[in-house]
Image (spheres, rainbow, N blue to C red):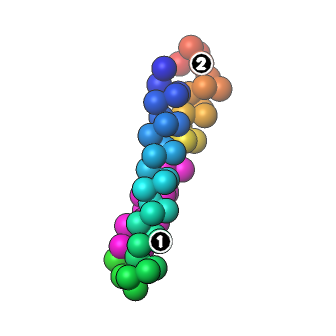
Amino acid sequence: MGEFTDKLKGHANEAVGKAKRVIGDALDRPDIQAEGDAQEAVGDFQKAKGTVKGALGDKI
């Protein structure tokens, strides 16, 4: 169950981060662009964590 949740949260954070980056580009706001980049990175990490949990299964 943790694998699916982590991957889902990762995809959500990645999507919100991309949206923030686009908004930051449109408004010429580097601070919003940076927030988007950071949120995307969190999403990537969460997806990777979910993949590792799936690979390890019940071994941990």
Callout 1 secondary element: helix
* In the displayed structure image, the side of residue 39 where residue 4 appears, left or right: right
Could you tell me what secondary structure mostly forms the magenta stretch? helix
Callout 2 secondary element: helix
- Residue placed under numbered mark 2 in the picture: 57
Q: Calculate the distance from the C-alpha at mark 1 to the C-alpha at mark 2.
A: 37 Å
Range drawn in magenta: 32-44
Residue density around tag 1, few if under 14, some if 14–19, many if 20 or more, within 10 Å: some
**Front-lying residue, 2 or 24:** 24
Q: Is residue 42 visible?
A: no
Q: Residue at coordinates 44% horizontally, 50% vertically from top-left? A: 13
Q: Residue at coordinates 52% horizontally, 36% vertically from top-left? A: 7
Q: Residue at coordinates 57% horizontally, 41% vertically from top-left? A: 48
x and y percentages locating residue 3 in the rendered image: 53, 27
x and y percentages locating residue 56 in the rendered image: 61, 23
- Residue placed under numbered mark 1 in the picture: 22
